[in-house]
Image (cartoon, grey):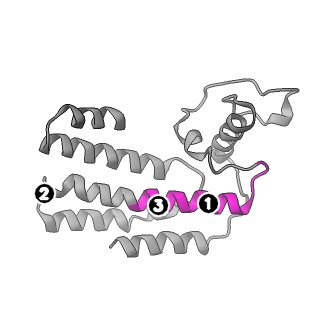
Amino acid sequence: LIDFSDWTMVEMINNTNVLFLIWADESDYYNYAVNLNEYGVYSRSWADQHKGNPRPDGLRNPGYSLFLLPFVESPPTENMLRTIQIAQVVLSVVSIVLLYFALHSLINPWINVVVCSLVATSAHLIAANIYVLTESLFAFLMCGLACSFAFLARFPSYKSISLVGLMI
C-alpha cells in the first residue's frame, strides 16, 4: 500500500509539466521563506520592490514558510521545486503510516487497512504534492496529532501529554 502510494505520488511529480515554478498562493509562501532566509524578515513582498529590507507582515501563518526555509533558492529553480515536491511526498507517505498507527487500537484492522487505502489513493493527496502549498504538511501534522492522541489514550503519562502539546 505504501509503495503504491509513493509510486503514484512520484509518478505524478515526474509526469506533470508545471507551467510556472512559483505562482498564485505559492508565491506568498515562497516569498516569506526567501525573505526569512535572506533578510531575516517575515514578509511576502518581493525584495526588489523595496530599497533595503522588505517590510514585515503577517498575512499568512509562518508554519509552511518555515518548512520551505531549507529548500528555497532565489531565484526559484526546477531543482528547488523538485526537492520541495519530494519532501512533500515523504510527508504524505508518513501521514498514511501515522494514520494507520492512530487507528490501529481503535478500529478493526481490516477497516483500518481500507481507510488507509482510501487515503493513500486519494487524488487530492497525490496531486497536492506537485504544488508548493500547505496540504501535505497539514495532512502530516493532523495525522501526527491523531497518532499522538492515540498514544496518549494507550499510554497516559506526562510524556504523552507533552507529545500531544507539541503536535498541537
Element at label 3: helix
Q: Are marks 2 and 1 in contact (CB under 8 Å)?
A: no
Between 155 and 112, the one lying in front of the other is: 155
- Residue denoted by label 3: 90
Looking at the rendered structure, which numbered label has been put on residue 83? 1
The answer to whether 132 appears left or right of 108 in the picture is right
Q: CA distance from mark 3 to mark 1?
A: 11 Å
The region drawn magenta spans: 74-93
Between 33 and 114, the one lying in front of the other is: 33
Q: Is residue 161 above or below residue 17?
A: above
The answer to whether 150 appears left or right of 25 in the picture is left
Between 91 and 46, the one lying in front of the other is: 91
Amino acid type, mark 3: Val
Q: Residue at x 49, y 69 (%)?
A: 9
The quadrant of the rendering that contains the C terminus is top left
Element at label 1: helix
Verify whether residue 80 appears in magenta: yes
Q: Is residue 150 above or below residue 109?
A: above
- Kindly tell me whether residue 128 is visible in this rendering: no
Q: CA distance from mark 3 to mark 2?
A: 26 Å
Q: Nearer the viewer, mark 2 or mark 1?
A: 1
- Residue denoted by label 2: 107
